[in-house]
C-alpha cells in the first residue's frame, strides 16, 4: 500500500493521510490484509469522487482519518475497511449488496450498522436522531466494531466542526456530549471520551471554554512550583520504601472542571485546588503498598478513598483513588494503578484489538474480561430495546444507563450488585432478575424491613421479599433509576393491559353473541377468519384487544359474525341495539375498566359504561351530567352493573359546609376515621369568617358505607350541610 501512496502526487491532503495510514498498518498487519484495505480505499475514493466537505477538502479525507484513528487502536482489517467505506451507502450510489459482493458480508454489515436511516417517517428531528441511534445500537449488539467506527467517525467530525453553521455545530456538540462521550466512557475508552468532551464543550459553550482555558493557564503558572514540590516528595518517599513507580502530574479536563463547578455550584478556585497525580506500578499488590506510603506522607481526607481495584467500575476501570491534604493545606487527588490498568482505562473495549496479538496471558485475560463486561452491557441494552415502546423511550432509557454513579450492595449470599447512585429496592430486585422485580413487595436491608422506594447506599445487604400475587405498580416509575427496571416495568404494564383488554373484549363479544343465540367457540373458524380478513386484523386476540380498548364496538362485531355474508355492511334498525343484559364489573379489573373521576361511582350506584378508544370502558354514575350527551349515541355506551361480591375501597367525593372554627377539620377527619374510612384529599372551595365549604375525597366500601358516614357527619353541630358530588 505504501507503493500506492508513493505513486501518487503527494500534494493533496488525502495522499499524506494515506501514507500515515500505511505506515501505521504495516506495524501490525500482513501484506494480504493491507492489500484488501487498499481495495477498499480505492473503491471508497472512486465512490466519493467529486464530493467535498464543508472545509473544501476532498470527502475521502474523512474516511481515511477515521481509519487512522482505528489503526492507532490496532483495529483488525475488516474494521479498517469498514471505516474507509462507512459513508458510501449513505452518500453514494453504492449498496450493502455491492459491498457484500466486493468485500464480504461482514464488512457490509459493519458499514450498514454505522449508516443512518435515510428515509424515516418521523414527526421531528429528535425522533429521526433517536431512530438512528437505536439502529446503531442494534448493530452494535451484534458487533462491537460498529460503535468503534462510529466513535472514530464522530471524533473526526468534532475535530473538523469549524466550517459548520453555528446552529448545526451546537446540535452536533450536544449530541456528542449527551450520547457519544458517555458511550465511550461506558466502554472504558477514556482517551476518546476526553477528546469528545473537550471538543463538544468548546463547540457548545465557546465563551465558557475560553474563560476556563485562560483561568487554567494562569493557575498553571502560579502553581507550578507547588506541583513540583508535591511530585518530588512522592517520588522520594516511594524510593525510600523501595518501590519503583512512575509519578506523573495530571491536568484536569476542562469539561470535567466545568461539570464539577456546575454540579457542586462552586468557583473555579475550589475545583482547581485539587492537584491531580497518577502513580503507575507493576503489580496490584504494589498499588496498596503505595497507598500506605502516600497516606503516611500526607493526611488522607476521611470518606474520600475509593477502591476500584477490588470493586471495578461497570466499564472495567480499575484504580485506587484517594484525596490527601498536601503542603499549604491544598487537597491532592492521587490515582494509583498498574501499567496494564492504565492502558485498559485509556483503551477500554478497544484493548480487545490492541492486545490481540500479545502473548501475555494476564493482559489477554484482562481484555477478555473487559469485552465480557461490554457484551453484558449490550445484552442489557438489547433487553431494554425489546421492551421500549418507541425510539424516544429507548433514548431516555439509554441516557439513564449512560450516567451511573455507582453504589455497591450485597445479596444475602454475599454477591455484589452494582447500581447507580439513587437506586432503590426495586432497581436492586430487577438487577437480580426480572421475575424478582415483577413480584417484589418489600425488602429487608441489613435485616430491617424497609419499603420499596428506599434508596440504597454502599455496603448494605439487601434481601427482596416476593409473593406470587404481586405485580409491578405504575408508581414505581416515579422512583426507579436504572434503565432495566424502567423498561421492564413498562413492558410488563403494557403486556398486562393488553391481556386485560383481550379478556374484557372476549366478555363483551360473548355477551352480545349470547343475545343472538350464538357462542364464540361454536362459530365456524372459516367465518371468524373471513371477519379478520375483512377487518384487516392479524389475529382474534388483536380483534378482542380492540374491542376491550373501545376501538371496535362489540355489538357491531357480533352482528357481522351472525351474518352469512361477513363482508356486507352492518345495518341497524332504529330500535336495534346490543343485548339488554348488563356487563358485570367489580371495579378492580385494572387499566381497561376505569372509574370516572367526575362522578366517582361506587358499588351500589346505578352505573353506565362508555367506550373510550384506546382506554377501554370508563364507568360513570347514572346521574352524571357528563354522560348525558354520550348516552344519545347508542353504539357508544353499554349497561353495566356492580358484581354482588365486589370488595375493596373506592374513592367518593362529598361537599360539606362547616362552621369556620378552629379544629373543625380535625373533628371531621376523626369522625371519618372512626367510620373505617380514610381521607384521600381535601380542597377548600370557599371560605369566609363564618362558613367553610370543602370538597373531601374519602374511601368507602360501597353506597351503604358512604350513607352511614354522611349520616354520622350530619349529627355534628359544626356541619351545616353535606351532599355527595355526582358530577
Image: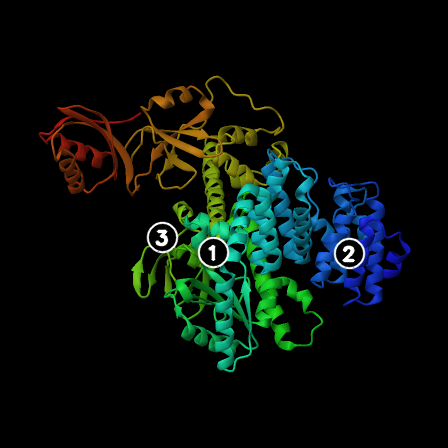
Foreground label between 1 and 2: 1
Sort mark 1 into few (<14), some (14-19) or many (20+) by Cα contacts within 10 Å: some
Give the number of the disc on residue 366: none
* Location of residue 208 in the rendering, given as x and y in whole percent from the top left corner: 53, 44
* Location of residue 378 in the rendering, given as x and y in whole percent from the top left corner: 59, 57
Sequence-wise, the earlier of marks 1 and 2 is 2
Vertical order, 213 against 606 (above or below): below
Q: Is residue 698 left or right of residue 552?
A: left
CA separation, marks 2 and 3?
50 Å
* Location of residue 572 in the rendering, given as x and y in whole percent from the top left corner: 52, 21
Q: Residue at x 78, y 44 (%)?
A: 57
Vertical order, 543 against 635 (above or below): below
Foreground label between 2 and 3: 2
Quarter of the image with the C terminus is: top left
Sequence-wise, the earlier of marks 2 and 3 is 2
Q: Farthest residue toward the top? A: 574
Q: Which residue is mark 3?
A: 453
Q: Which residue is mark 2?
A: 81
Q: In the rendered image, is residue 337 in sight?
A: yes
Q: Which residue is mark 1?
A: 272
Quarter of the rendering containing residue 602 = top left
Quarter of the image with the N terminus is: bottom right
Q: Is residue 443 left or right of residue 379?
A: left
Q: In the rendered image, is residue 1 in sight?
A: no
Amino acid at each position: 500500500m505504501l507503493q500506492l501512496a508513493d505513486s501518487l502526487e503527494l500534494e493533496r491532503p488525502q495522499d499524506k493521510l494515506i501514507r500515515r495510514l500505511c505506515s501505521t498498518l504495516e506495524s501490525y498487519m500482513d501484506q494480504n490484509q493491507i492489500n484488501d484495505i487498499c481495495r477498499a480505499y480505492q473503491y471508497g475514493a472512486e465512490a466519493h469522487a467529486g464530493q467535498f466537505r464543508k472545509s473544501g477538502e476532498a470527502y475521502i479525507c474523512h474516511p481515511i482519518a477515521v481509519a487512522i484513528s482505528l489503526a492507532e487502536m490496532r483495529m483488525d482489517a475488516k474494521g479498517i475497511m469498514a471505516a474507509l467505506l462507512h459513508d458510501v451507502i449513505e452518500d453514494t450510489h453504492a449498496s450493502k449488496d455491492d459491498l457484500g459482493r466486493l468485500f464480504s458480508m461482514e464488512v457490509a454489515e459493519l458499514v450498514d450498522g454505522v449508516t443512518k436511516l435515510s428515509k424515516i417517517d418521523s414527526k421531528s428531528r429528535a425522533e429521526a436522531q433517536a431512530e438512528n441511534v437505536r439502529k446503531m445500537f442494534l448493530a452494535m449488539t451484534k458487533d462491537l466494531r460498529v460503535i468503534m467506527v462510529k466513535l472514530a467517525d464522530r471524533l473526526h467530525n468534532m475535530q473538523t466542526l469549524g466550517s459548520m453553521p453555528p446552529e448545526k455545530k451546537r446540535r452536533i456538540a450536544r449530541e456528542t456530549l449527551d450520547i457519544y462521550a458517555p458511550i465511550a466512557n461506558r466502554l472504558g475508552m477514556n482517551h476518546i471520551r476526553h477528546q469528545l468532551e473537550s471538543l463538544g464543550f468548546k463547540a457548545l459553550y465557546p465563551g465558557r471554554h475560553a474563560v476556563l482555558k485562560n483561568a487554567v493557564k494562569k493557575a498553571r503558572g502560579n502553581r507550578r512550583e507547588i506541583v513540583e514540590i508535591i511530585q518530588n516528595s512522592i517520588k522520594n518517599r516511594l524510593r525510600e520504601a523501595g518501590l519503583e513507580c512512575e509519578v506523573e502530574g495530571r491536568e484536569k479536563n476542562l469539561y470535567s472542571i466545568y461539570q464539577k463547578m456546575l454540579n457542586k455550584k462552586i468557583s473555579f478556585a475550589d475545583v482547581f485546588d485539587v492537584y491531580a497525580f497518577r502513580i503507575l506500578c507493576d503489580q496490584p499488590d504494589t498499588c496498596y503498598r503505595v497507598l500506605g506510603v502516600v497516606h503516611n506522607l500526607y493526611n488522607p481526607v476521611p470518606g474520600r478513598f475509593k477502591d476500584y481495584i477490588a470493586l471495578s467500575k461497570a466499564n472495567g476501570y480499575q484504580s485506587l483513588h484517594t484525596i490527601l491534604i498536601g503542603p499549604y493545606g491544598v487537597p491532592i487527588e492521587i490515582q494509583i494503578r498498574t501499567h496494564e490498568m492504565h492502558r485498559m482505562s485509556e483503551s477500554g473495549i478497544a484493548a480487545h484489538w490492541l492486545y490481540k496479538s500479545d502473548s501475555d496471558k494476564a493482559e489477554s485475560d484482562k481484555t477478555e474480561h473487559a469485552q465480557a463486561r461490554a457484551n453484558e452491557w449490550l445484552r442489557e441494552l438489547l433487553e431494554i430495546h425489546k421492551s421500549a415502546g418507541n425510539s424516544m423511550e429507548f433514548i431516555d432509557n439509554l441516557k439513564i444507563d449512560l450516567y451511573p454513579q455507582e453504589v455497591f450492595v450485597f445479596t444475602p449470599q454475599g454477591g455484589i450488585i452494582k447500581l447507580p447512585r439513587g437506586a432503590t429496592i426495586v432497581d436492586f430486585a430487577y438487577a437480580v432478575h426480572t421475575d424478582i422485580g415483577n413480584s417484589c413487595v418489600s425488602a429487608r436491608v441489613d435485616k430491617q424491613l424497609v419499603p420499596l422506594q428506599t434508596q440504597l447506599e454502599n455496603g448494605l445487604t439487601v434481601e427482596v421479599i416476593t409473593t406470587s400475587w404481586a405485580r409491578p405498580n405504575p408508581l414505581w416509575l416515579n422512583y426507579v433509576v436504572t434503565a432495566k427496571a424502567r423498561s421492564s416495568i413498562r413492558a410488563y404494564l403494557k403486556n398486562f393491559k393488553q391481556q386485560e383488554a383481550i379478556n374484557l373484549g372476549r366478555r363483551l363479544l360473548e355477551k352480545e353473541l349470547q343475545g343472538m343465540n350464538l357462542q364464540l367457540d361454536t362459530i365456524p373458524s372459516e367465518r371468524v377468519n373471513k371477519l379478520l380478513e375483512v377487518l384487516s386484523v392479524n389475529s382474534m386476540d388483536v380483534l378482542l384487544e380492540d374491542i376491550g380498548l373501545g376501538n371496535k364496538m362489540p355489538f357491531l362485531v357480533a352482528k357481522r359474525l351472525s351474518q352469512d355474508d361477513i363482508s356486507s355492511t352492518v345495518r341497524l334498525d332504529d330500535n336495534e341495539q346490543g343485548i339488554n343484559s348488563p356487563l358485570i364489573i367489580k371495579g378492580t379489573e385494572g387499566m381497561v375498566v376505569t372509574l370516572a373521576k367526575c362522578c366517582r361511582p361506587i358499588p351500589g350506584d346505578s352505573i353506565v359504561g362508555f367506550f373510550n378508544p384506546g382506554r377501554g370502558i370508563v364507568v360513570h354514575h347514572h346521574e352524571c351530567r357528563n354522560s348525558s350527551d354520550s348516552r344519545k349515541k347508542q353504539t357508544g355506551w353499554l349497561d353495566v352493573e356492580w358484581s354482588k361480591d365486589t370488595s375493596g375501597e373506592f374513592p367518593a367525593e362529598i361537599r360539606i359546609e362547616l362552621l369556620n372554627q378552629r379544629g373543625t377539620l380535625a373533628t371531621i377527619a376523626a369522625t371519618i376515621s372512626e367510620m373505617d374510612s380514610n381521607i384521600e384529599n381535601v380542597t377548600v372551595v370557599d371560605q369566609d369568617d363564618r362558613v367553610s365549604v370543602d370538597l373531601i375525597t374519602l374511601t368507602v366500601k360501597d353506597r351503604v358505607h358512604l350513607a352511614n358516614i354522611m349520616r354520622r357527619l350530619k349529627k355534628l353541630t359544626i356541619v351545616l350541610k353535606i351532599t355527595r358530588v355526582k358530577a
